Image: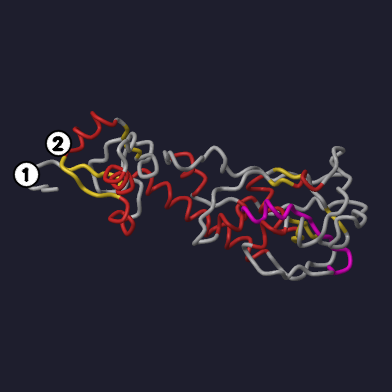
């Protein structure tokens, strides 16, 4: 269309294709391109392939006949959503860094290991769980599916959603202590050390804690569990905590991602 001398709107190329090829294309659907602020939420490099500029007069004609929306009048991405995404990307980088720094292949004498779900961890690193820990140390087991969701979250390309609380209850019977039958290491769960467990649990909460003397969910738990905690400044991601509360984004649920206080582990 000729855009000279007319205000411009942006129209879905997919809907325009339907309009040219289907007698009844239905309402215009911009839900995948617009945020809750009714502004464009499409990356600049993808915009030309998904949206086409049309005169405002033509938009009014189409929407009066077919309905739908919302109307997108600016080619600039929503500033509030961009700010929220920047905060979330800083969180991804921070969590990846602190977990990587704490993911040792050994534990200090007297320290313990924490077990974590393999699928969740598999997207973050390769299959490299140890089959032993130093004398006196323990493993902390974690649900693999939860670990896979965290790995997808911190992955720069996948940029998955913020994971919820750790879902170790999937590995246990209703009593919350007895492991379900048929669980396999590397298939249903993974193992992490104490520092990594406290980072995950301090940020996301959930559980329950599954601590073992060997990297085997059916192994005996230690006689006593470690009460040692990481300093809170190592778990949280300043200044992200305040940023989570300040950024308004329709695409990010910041109620989910408030860092939680670490729990003392008792038996």
Identify the image quadrant of the C terminus: top right
The disc label shown at residue 23, or none:
none
Tell me the SS state at disc 2: helix
Where residue 256 sits: x, y (%)? 57, 40
Indicate yes or no whether the magenta region holds residue 121: no
Where residue 51 sits in the image (x, y, percent)?
28, 49
Q: Kindly tell me whether residue 78 is visible in this rendering.
A: no
- Where disc 1 sits, the SS reads loop
Is 167 positioned to the left or the right of 178 in the image?
left
Q: Which of marks 2 and 1 is in front?
A: 2
Q: Which residue is drawn at 32% across and 38% down?
A: 25
Give above or below for 67 relative to 128.
above
Is residue 146 a member of the stretch shown in magenta? Answer: yes
The residue depicted at 47 percent of the width and 55 percent of the height is: 89
Q: How crowded is mark 1: few (under 14 residues within 10 Å), some or many (20 or more)?
A: few
Label annotation for residue 57 = 2
Measure the C-alpha gap from mark 2 to mark 1: 11 Å
Question: Which residue carries the number 1 mark?
Answer: 5
Which segment is the magenta one?
A: 132-149
Residue 253 horizontal/vertical position (percent): 51, 40
Task: Residue 74: tell me if it is visible.
Answer: yes
- The answer to whether 217 is drawn above or below residue 174 in the figure is below
**Relative to residue 160, is residue 107 depicted above or below?**
below
Q: Which residue lies furthest to the left in this view?
A: 5
- Tell me the crowding category of disc 2: few under 14, some 14 to 19, or many 20 or more residues within 10 angstroms, Cα based: few
- Is there CB contact under 8 Å for labels 2 and 1? no
Q: Position of residue 181 (x, y in %)?
A: 88, 50
Q: Which residue is drawn at 32% across and 52% down?
A: 50
Answer with mark 2 or mark 1, whichever residue precedes in sequence. Answer: 1
Q: Viewer-proximal residue, 237 or 123?
A: 123
Q: In this view, does 222 lie to the left or right of 251?
A: right
């Amino acid at each position: 269309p000729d855009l000279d001398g007319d205000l411009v709107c942006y129209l879905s190329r997919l809907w325009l294709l339907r309009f040219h090829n289907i007698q009844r294309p239905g309402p215009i659907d911009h839900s995948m391109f617009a945020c809750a602020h009714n502004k464009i939420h499409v990356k600049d490099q993808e915009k030309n392939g998904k949206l086409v500029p049309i005169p405002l007069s033509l938009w009014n004609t189409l929407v009066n006949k077919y309905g739908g929306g919302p109307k997108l009048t600016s080619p600039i991405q929503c500033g509030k959503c961009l700010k929220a995404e920047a905060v979330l990307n800083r969180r991804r980088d921070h969590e990846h860094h602190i977990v990587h720094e704490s993911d040792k292949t050994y534990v200090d004498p007297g320290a313990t290991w924490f077990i974590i779900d393999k699928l969740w961890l598999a997207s973050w690193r390769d299959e490299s769980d140890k089959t032993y820990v130093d004398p006196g140390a323990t493993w902390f087991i974690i649900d693999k599916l939860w670990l896979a969701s965290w790995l997808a979250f911190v992955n720069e390309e996948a940029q998955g959603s913020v994971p919820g609380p750790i879902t170790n209850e999937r590995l246990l019977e209703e009593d919350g202590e007895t492991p379900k039958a048929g669980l396999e290491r590397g298939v249903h769960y993974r193992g992490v050390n104490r520092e990594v467990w406290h980072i995950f649990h301090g940020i996301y909460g959930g559980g329950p804690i599954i601590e073992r003397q060997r990297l085997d969910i059916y192994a005996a738990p230690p006689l006593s569990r470690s009460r040692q905690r990481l300093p809170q400044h190592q778990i949280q991601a300043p200044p992200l905590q305040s940023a989570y509360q300040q950024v308004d984004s329709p695409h990010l649920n910041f109620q989910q991602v408030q860092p939680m206080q670490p729990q003392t582990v008792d038996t």
